[in-house]
Image (cartoon, grey):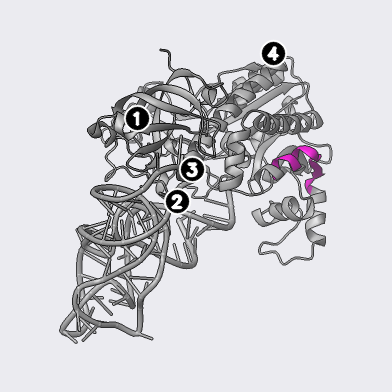
Amino acid sequence: MPREKVKQLMTSEPGRDVLVKGWVRTRRGSKQVSFVALNDGSTINNIQVVIDMQAFDEDKLRLITTGACLAVEGELVKSEGRGQKVEIQAKKIEIYGPANPEKYPLQKKGHSMEFLREIAHLRFRTNTFGAVFRIRHAMAYAIHKYFNDRGFYYLHTPIITGSDAEGAGEMFRVTTFDLNDAPRDKNGGVDYSRDFFGKETNLTVSGQLEGEMGALSLGEIYTFGPTFRAENSNTPRHLAEFWMIEPEMAFYDIDDNMDLAEDLTKYLITYALDNCYDDLEFLNNMIDKGLIDRLRFVLDNEYARITYTQAVDVLLKADKQWEFPVGWGKDLQAEHERYLVEQYYKRPVMITDYPMDIKAFYMKQNDDGKTVRALDVLFPFIGEIIGGSQREEEYDKLERRIKELGMPREQLWWFMETRKFGTAPHSGFGLGFERLILFVTGMKNIRDVIPFPRTPRSAEF
RNA sequence: UCCUCAGUAGCUCAGCUGGUUAGAGCGGCGGACUGUUAAUCCGUAGGUCGAAGGUUCGAAUCCUUCCUGGGGAGCCA
């Protein structure tokens, strides 16, 4: 008999024999009859297996405890109890793997996220994490679908980079040297010319620069891969290893860039509501009562589009005591961004045209000589979910900026050549995948939306 | 990295102005119950009080350092 998944069985007609395989979530009952909630990961819902206690060997039944893995053959019947349409009247039970109830850490009761994080290898077996990781999958799939349907090419930019000019943060060194006995040069420094790549290499902090190379020929590309930042960041919104989506588009200006950012994020939220409703409903009930309303609200409203200068004006006029002063030229603090998004506009906010001095070298310089065409997209409760810009395509302006900032020009020769040969206006941004998942699931800590989080002093599993 | 709060049973916590044998709920185990939905009821086991020093006749409780975790800030996705 072929195995069927719980998801299919829940909506299928009773009156036939079926085979399911899955893990026991709970078991209850009396001496006569036992009810087992079985889950196989295909859905948040469990199928109820009804066991006539007299019909089975006692030693076998003793092994059916929370966490055990079973195969159950039986008739799919209309449920006599409330709470489910169908259930399985067990005829044959095979125990694949028992789970000692005195040792198995997951209980019928709810657990704290902090505890579950310590048993990340088992937390997939909870309703919450099952929902989160099904949604995470759906979002990854939807991202590829969105871009593919619109003619973007998925470009694989390198994970090991030979450039430390990406400028997005501290990097993890990649080396094959024995750290206790690294080759030395004449001056006593480490001789990287004898390392694997013959130079210093690091894990990428962004695929943007390489992505631009692709866009300036393929037209529209996107990357979607792991990204590494060795910053000592200890917050519920930062990971040392995370996934980022970076679209890069030739001939897009800052407005086209904003249109794409808004359309993409709305598409993904719509996709979740259309395809993951069971899971969202569970999260709405158990994690965040405002989740589904908030998702719908974002879809129903245009994102606010303001410049940095307008944002500063709003903040200056606000009747609020700021912990950090507001002023043109200063970067916006978390409290300022939260005010704009959660209190003033009450919807996602896109801020453009930041002061040149607080943004990266590659951003398109405005004619005012003071600002650049940066783009930050701020989401309620998450903060910055997207950072991007129109790119500086003029060779001279870009080179001047690189010089001003004292950046290693020689490492960027290939980047500069695209401005030398057939340069084109273009734009792009980076969308933090885990931050998107935070927003879509209502989870509060980024460590709970990636299977095995990597953070400072933490790389277990 | 800075600020702040917290580490007591498998889990969630109470006990903390120092004082005899450290408690509860849930979970586990045993029992009761003809169909339960985080079932219910009765009973029961379970703890080097995060670690190391120190103060004291006496420390879960006070002090110091360290470790771990939460929240806030910075860095950013």
- Tag 3: amino acid: Arg
Q: Residue A406's x, y, as percent?
A: 60, 38
Give the chain of mark 1. A
Secondary structure at badge 3 equals helix
Q: Is residue A253 above or below residue A312?
A: above
Q: Are marks 3 and 2 in contact (CB under 8 Å)?
A: no
Viewer-closest of A106 and A370: A106
Which numbered disc covers residue A69?
1
Secondary structure at badge 4 equals helix
Marks 2/1: CA–CA distance: 24 Å
Give the chain of mark 2. A
Marks 1/4: CA–CA distance: 52 Å
Residue at the spot 48% in from the left edge and 36% down from the top edge: A171
Image quadrant in which you'd find residue A393: top right
Which numbered disc covers residue A447?
3
Residue at the spot 49% in from the left edge and 26% down from the top edge: A77
Q: Is residue A73 above or below residue A64?
A: above
Left or right: A318 in relation to A432: right
Q: Which residue is mark 2?
A: A112
Q: Which residue is mark 4?
A: A217
Give the chain of mark 4. A
- Marks 1 and 4 share the same chain: yes
Residue at the spot 80% in from the left edge and 43% down from the top edge: A304
Which is more N-terminal, label 1 or label 3? 1
Q: Residue A217's x, y, as percent?
A: 69, 13
Marks 3/1: CA–CA distance: 27 Å
Viewer-closest of A202 and A78: A78
Secondary structure at badge 2 equals loop
**Where is the C terminus of chain A found, in terms of image quarters?**
top left
Marks 3/2: CA–CA distance: 13 Å
